[in-house]
Amino acid sequence: EPEVTQTPSHQVTQMGQEVILRCVPISNHLYFYWYRQILGQKVEFLVSFYNNEISEKSEIFDDQFSVERPDGSNFTLKIRSTKLEDSAMYFCASSSQIQETQYFGPGTRLLVL
Amino acid sequence: AQSVSQHNHHVILSEAASLELGCNYSYGGTVNLFWYVQYPGQHLQLLLKYFSGDPLVKGIKGFEAEFIKSKFSFNLRKPSVQWSDTAEYFCAVYQAGTALIFGKGTTLSVSS
């Protein structure tokens, strides 16, 4: 069964550094998403992406965040200058259509020191 | 804005006990509803979903959920839990747009 994959599984970085989280969505899916879960809190929506542009973004997704689909398979989330409060599990997801089931990757655990 | 409440934070059951996990959402318009499960060390997986039709939906591994529109609820049930059901369970809702809104999750611990 096709799966969403994410790399790396864990990332430790220093505050102020840039990080790029990578995702490979399911190959025939058209919609891509990033979510995050701070320890002990809800899974929160960050951004959705369709047809090479952002469809929707939350208040969390400020100017420090960007997304890109650099080629036909990868979908990346970049955090330009990490803050301590960016420490969280970041999940990528994809779906075939809008409002359809989203399939999630295993997550990247980001720790900002 | 849409919000999702899961009232049970941590549920502890013995094997063969029945399970019901509550989920309520705040907005009364048309919604698509989901239950996801996260087994220890694994990623979020879809258990079941409701888009329309029969309000009683059946999912994988013997789980079912009932959509009650008048109560804004989508409770998850299983008649007899197994040790392997130990996991975290998330209710999620689409209202409009592309964002899934999640509840805080319920940790289920099943003892054998």
Image (cartoon, rainbow, N blue to C red):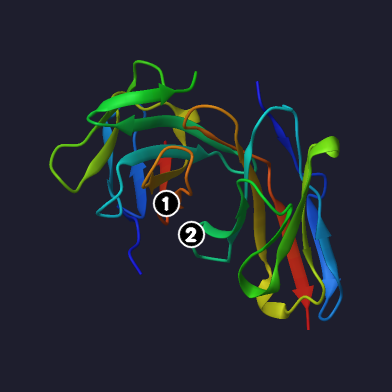
Q: Position of residue B42 (x, y in %)?
A: 49, 64
From the viewer's perspective, is residue A2 above or below residue A23? below
| Local secondary structure at mark 1 | loop
Q: Position of residue B35 (x, y in %)?
A: 64, 53
Give the quarter of the image for residue B96: top right
- Residue type, mark 2 in image: His
Left/right of residue A17 with respect to residue B1 in the rendered view: left
Discs 2 and 1 lie in a common subunit = no
- Give the residue at the far front of this rendering: B53
Q: Chain of mark 1?
A: A
Which residue occupies the foreground of this view, A37 or B7? B7
Can the viewer see residue A63 in this picture? yes
The residue beneath circle 2 is B43
Residue A107: mark in rendering: 1
Give the residue at x 75% y 29%. Answer: B26
Q: CA distance from mark 2 to mark 1?
A: 7 Å
Say whether marks 2 and 1 touch (CB < 8 Å).
Answer: yes
Give the quarter of the image for residue A52: top left
